[in-house]
Amino acid sequence: MKFEVENIKCGGCASSIRKGLMQVDGVESAEVDVENGAVEVAAPESAADAIREKLAHMGYPEAGSVSGLRSAGAKAKSFASCAVGRMNGDS
């Protein structure tokens, strides 16, 4: 399954996304394309909503799915996720 998401900026973001998605039931693997803002997930279709929810909760909502204040909130969450990924040495 492929998801086009917002706010991916660097390897720290990618690391946080991978680690977060591996916590979702059914996810076997997650690959992040930082340049294109895409996340490729190996999981059953039944996990799609949980994956979308996890991405949004971490600050990486699907492209075009949020706007206004919700978009600003998602961006703030993504900065926190990015920082955590960088602190773990994955930038």
Image (cartoon, helix red, strand yellow):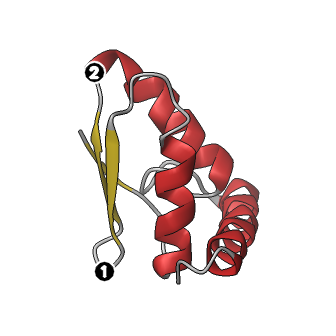
Q: Which of 61 and 55 is in front in this view?
A: 55
> Is 51 above or below relative to 84?
above
Q: Which mark is residue 35?
A: 1
Type of amino acid at the residue the image marks with label 2: Glu
Q: Quadrant of the N terminus?
A: top left
> Is 89 above or below relative to 20?
below
Name the residue furthest front: 89
x then y, percent, for residue 40: 27, 50
Q: Which of marks 2 and 1 is nearer the N terminus?
A: 1
Q: What element carries label 2?
A: helix
Type of amino acid at the residue the image marks with label 1: Glu
Residue neighbourhood size for the residue with mark 1, other residues' Cα within 10 Å, grouped as few (<14), some (14–19), many (≥20): few
x then y, percent, for residue 54: 58, 39
Q: Which residue is drawn at 53% across and 52% down?
A: 19
Q: Name the residue under label 2.
A: 45
Q: Can residue 7 be seen in this view?
A: no
Q: How many labels does the image show?
A: 2
Q: Residue 88 carries which label?
A: none
Residue 87 is drawn in which quadrant?
Answer: bottom right
> Is 69 above or below relative to 3?
below
